[in-house]
Amino acid sequence: MMDARELIVVGIDGSTASLAALRWALKEGVARDAAVEVVHCYLPQTLTDLGFSTPHELHTASAIMVDNEVSAALREMSEVPQVHQCSDSGGPAKVLLEKAANQVMLVSQSASTLLATCQKNTRSLNSSRAQHKHR
């Protein structure tokens, strides 16, 4: 269970860019004294996945990948933030946006994901301000 301090959400997929995002998010977590939630989203990708892999096997493979990448990144650091690892079934855009709702930061290898998050958070903030103003 994570405490109530700031939370940085970072999505990884095993690519070089996502692992760079992971390392940056971990360093930012230390700098901000924020927890970091590392998320991998998985869906069946091939006919083999669909025909021969159970949801449990897909989840297990995802969780192992996340653990390996987080462990490798943390070994490079002298100071580490609190880290929560998560493997979720679903498309990355939907899962990451849900996880990052009301959090301090979403780190992604994709600028379009970050833009969508900023736009969503801005709309939410504006809506909250409007509701507060009318009270």
Image: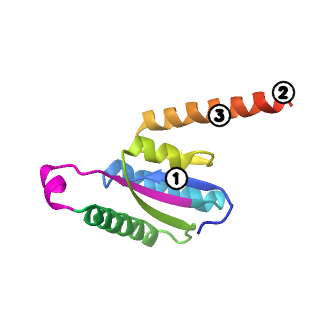
Within 10 Å of disc 2 (Cα), the crowding (few <14, some 14-19, many 20+) is few
Q: Amino acid at mark 3?
A: Ser
72 relative position to 119: left or right: left
Within 10 Å of disc 3 (Cα), the crowding (few <14, some 14-19, many 20+) is some
Earlier residue among tags 1 and 2: 1
Could you say where residue 98 lies in the image, as x and y percent from the top left? 51, 46
- Which is closer to the viewer, label 1 or label 2? 2
Q: Residue at x 53, y 37 (%)?
A: 117
Label 1 secondary element: strand
Label 2 secondary element: loop
Could you say where residue 112 lies in the image, as x and y percent from the top left? 43, 33
Within 10 Å of disc 1 (Cα), the crowding (few <14, some 14-19, many 20+) is many
Q: Which residues make up the magenta segment?
A: 36-53
Residue 124's disc number: 3
Could you say where residue 135 lies in the image, as x and y percent from the top left? 86, 31
Q: Amino acid at mark 2?
A: His
Q: Residue at x 70, y 30 (%)?
A: 127
Is residue 42 on the magenta stretch?
Answer: yes
Tell me the residue that label 1 is attached to. Answer: 9
Q: Is residue 26 something that shows in the picture? A: no
Q: Amino acid at mark 1?
A: Val
Is residue 132 on the magenta stretch?
Answer: no
Question: How far, Cα to Cα, is label 2 from label 3?
Answer: 16 Å
- Which colour style is shown? rainbow
Tell me the residue that label 2 is attached to. Answer: 134
